[in-house]
Image (tube, rainbow, N blue to C red):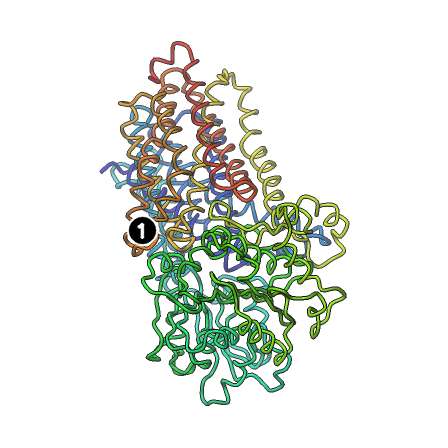
Amino acid sequence: MHWSYLGVGLISAATLILQIALTRVFSVAQWYHFAFLSVSVALLGFGASGSILALRSRFTRDGKARDLSVACLCFSVCTLASYLAVNFLPFDSFRIAWQREQLLYLALYYLALVAPFLFGGLAIGIVLQSDRDRIGTAYAVNMVGSALGCLSVIGLLPLLGGSGVVALVAALGAVSALLFLGPKDSRPVGSTVQAKALLAGAVAALVLSMSLLIRPPVWWDVRMSPYKTLSTALRFPDSRVLYRGWNTISRVDVVEGDGIHSAPGLSLAYARALPPQLGLTVDGGNLSPITRQASREDEAFLDYLPAALAYELRPAGRALIIEPGGGLDVLTALHRGASRVTVVEGNPAIADMVRDRYGEYAGHIYQDARVRLIVESGRSFVRRADEEFDVVQLSLTDTYRPITSGAFGLSESYAYTLEAYSGYLDCLGPRGILMVTRWLQDPPSEESRAFALAVEALEWLGVPEPSRCIVAFRSWSTATTICSLTPFTAEELEVLRGFCDRLHFDVVYYPGMRREEANRYNRLAEPTYFDGFSRLLTAGDRELVYREQPFRITPPVDDRPFFYHFFRWSQVPDILKGFGKTWQPFGGSGYLVLIALLVLALVASGSLILLPLALGSRRGVRFRWRYLLYFALLGIGYLWIEIPLMQRFILFLGQPTYAFGIVLFALLLASGIGSAVSDRLNGAATLLALAVIASLYPLLLPELFAHCLGMALLGRITVAVACIVPVGLLMGVPFPKGIAILTSEAPALIPWVWGVNGCFSVISSIVATMLSVSFGFSTVLWLACAAYALSAIVMLFLGRERRRFL
């Protein structure tokens, strides 16, 4: 096997493993929306590598081996260094409004992460540039290696954890450096000292990486934001972590301490102490209690929770509880006499904590004869459910997030979309009820959006009078919406009023409710929630009601599943007015995080990619702007298909890591195959076919998901790969097709188009996310089709070179 190709495959795999692993590291260390950084920094690093290559366009055999080895060694070292920078730089996004040094830390944070991808891109770029007569093969090896890296990370994360996978990536970089050095008799002649130095460096990097992997020191573990729930819980005296473990989709911690008290919505009429609890956190956030069940005394508080009403309305009912975390809602259902409880938990690690590791502490609730535990995503189970339920409940297991923070506005949540609510309602029996509890916000936001979702889902299913099929009430901290496919009876409304009076909950809405009945116990200046909920049901123009709200509360759909995205551009003046004067830096505008990232990416890509290209233009390279435009459009098109497909397939595959890994695997593997046969295909026809096929995805994916969402995970993975491969094959053709033309017509432009492609990929990856949040995934896919169609038109006007493209 050719040493360079083996090395290219390995370094390609390592860079993709690192990219996906960083999404998990960011989710633990900071917040989920920082995971977008991994895509941006990877693309920026690859783009910058093209600009560096533009300054050195020729490689001798000896120089190529040396430079490849140096690039891989630097990749290995920078992987370790960038991870340490992320762990130890005192960057704090919450202080950026009044501490100017945080801007410097942010820039260092960003640039440190770019470094390993820059050197990984250099290694791949050197091979592509020096093996011009076998460009298709080299590009195919790059794509296949990247694809295998995407697939392997799914198995590596549970075994090694986020920090362990980073150490493994560094080790792979060191091995690549050794491979590029080759056997002793093939090392560069006259460079014995250099070869020995590189050999020693690669061995040292390998030994260091493996030691961090096998016996990681305490300081190598992922350092968590002080604002994470787990960090806060550990500040209490005597608090300690009992368990910590990684799986593919999360890091799960179980913490013990006297400060663990969690019962969302608990009535203020309950005057006794809560039983002891353990705190279960996912990625350091969303603390969910595992409640001790040692005696009947430990169950007394369950009668004072909002969920208790469901079992007064439907005594001895059959319950479906979705994502109950530590099991509090399961305890409530059993305590209140549910005849059968089906529990759907999407995270296997959480199910293991409650069922096995701490099963005795939790009273073996998952061994109760009335309980059936299903480990899969709620949407998938609901799609294939073959029984009807009297109660369907979405558990409130995420931590209270002030609407002013806006930190989770970029997080997809397929559990709270119009299609999801419709699926839950379809599972109900003749008199079944759907119960959803959300945190109470001021001004109203998430509780209003949850209510609006229920109203529109009832209308979507053709319920004639939704206003008679829905009720709502609030505690001092939560708001609960209950809806049914049939109108609530007078007797059921009396149960609601009696329950709320007994527990000092405030009724927010029921059919025929008078305004003076609201706002009795947890008093506000005005009955804001009653007024808002009533208007959603009675207004002739509901869209006008949505527009009048201070925050965006339009119900999300699967094409735009951002439940926590409440940002409106009208908030910007207030945000700027309070900038530097309030603890929450971004108001309700997590969206502004993307804008800040886009500005940073524009500056960084301009400095690291375009500036070197501009300097290189003095060397007499003649620009051919059609080629630059062509490769820019390819960068835009590829990312505007890749990004929305990754986010769209989260619904189908159940978890972000699965979606990122499987979608990237299928795209890159298919693209590698496409690039290998690119010289046999008509470039213009391929691009036009790609535009047509990609344009069908927004139309076909909803139907595909509707029919296949109920399949087992392995079946869904198979369907996902089969769905993505056709477009991936076509996406692999245009880049090497263009490179092949440049090889004979303008070889000096190869690193330039590599850099331009990378620059536009960096920008388009962020813009794709912004467009998805604002307009939906379908819009981004159609724009990608337009980019590919335009690139075909550009190449058809090349002149005499056009023949090589056809």
Of all residues shown, which one is farthest toward the top?
800
Q: Inspect this view and state whether residue 200 appears.
A: no
Please identify the quadrant where the C terminus is shown: top left
Q: Seen in the image, is 676 located left or right of residue 256?
A: left
Residue 327 point in image, percent of width and height: 45, 74
Mark 1, secondary structure of its residue = helix
Quarter location, residue 508:
bottom right
Residue under label 1: 716
Image position of 27 with respect to 602: above or below: below
Q: Seen in the image, is 381 located left or right of residue 455?
A: left
Of residues 223 and 712, the one drawn nearer to the viewer in this rendering: 712
Image position of 254 with respect to 568: above or below: below
Residue 653 point in image, percent of width and height: 37, 52
Of residues 615 and 197, the one drawn nearer to the viewer in this rendering: 615
Identify the residue at image location x=65%, y=78%.
Answer: 504
Which three-letter amino acid code belongs to the residue tagged 1? Arg
Image position of 278 with respect to 776: above or below: below
Residue 311 point in image, percent of width and height: 48, 76
How crowded is the residue under tag 1: few (<14 C-alpha within 10 Å), some, or many (20+)? many
Of all residues shown, which one is farthest toward the front?
490
Identify the residue at image location x=60%, y=68%.
Answer: 473
Quarter location, residue 72:
top left
Residue 56 point in image, percent of width and height: 46, 27
Of residues 502 and 680, the one drawn nearer to the viewer in this rendering: 502
